[in-house]
Image: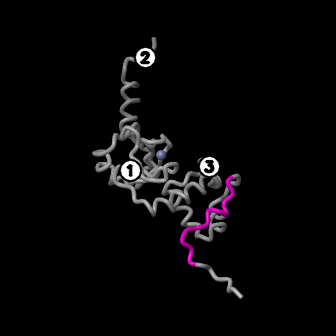
Amino acid sequence: MRAKRKAPVRSPSAQRVKATATYEIAEAAKLLGTHRNTVRRWLKDGLRPLDNRRPILIHGTDLKAFLAMRREGRRHRCGPGEFFCFKCRVPRRPLGGMADLHPRTDKVIALVGLCERCETAMHRTVRHADLPKLAAILDLGPMAPERLNECSDAKANGDFKEG
Ligand SMILES: [Zn+2]
């Protein structure tokens, strides 16, 4: 007889996630036998919510992809200027050495680049503090909030008046 014990979970089973379903944080946590806070952390680490509305919903496809990425990511460490490509299943440099910045929280920023080999979008979460280092090896753009503000200010201050 097998005792019903929690086996040491190497990685939460992505098999249980249905690609066609959407999950609330609590549902996803229960399904994967993990804590809600873990799922919240995943959201900060790059797991994509369905939209910005509450309650937060996560699409099964995104959840599966994220879990697969974590599993692979542990096996292959990305170098400083590399991203993990889902499709190639290895770390890759982004196309043209370019990555776009998408702020997530006060502390972290998501970087998005295209795989130089297959042009699949690749995501990576980095700390603000690491940006100067990354800027030295990658061409980061297009958004720095300050810069965007400058642009709109410049426009507003220009001779844009009518009559
Ligand atoms: Zn690729």
- Is residue 145 shown above or below 61? above
- Name the secondary structure under disc 1: loop
- x then y, percent, for residue 103: 44, 47
Instruction: Please tell me which residue is depicted at 49% across the width and 43% down the height of the picture.
Output: 121
Dividing the image into 4 quarters, which one contains the N terminus?
Answer: bottom right
Residue 161: mark: 2
**Of the residues shown, which amino acid type is indicated by label 1?**
Glu
71 sits to left or right of 50: left
Q: Going from the N terminus, do you reach mark 1 or mark 3 first?
A: 3
| Image quadrant assignment for residue 145 | top left
Estimate the spatial distance between the alpha carbons at disc 2 and disc 1, rounded to whole Å.
47 Å
* Predominant SS along the magenta part: loop
Q: Residues within 10 Å of mark 1 (few under 14, many from 20)?
A: many
**Of the residues shown, which amino acid type is indicated by label 2?**
Lys
| Image quadrant assignment for residue 17 | bottom right
Specify whether tag 1 is near ligand 1 (CB below 8 Å): no
What span is in magenta? 8-19
Query: Which residue position holds label 1?
Result: 82
Query: Which residue position holds label 3?
Result: 50
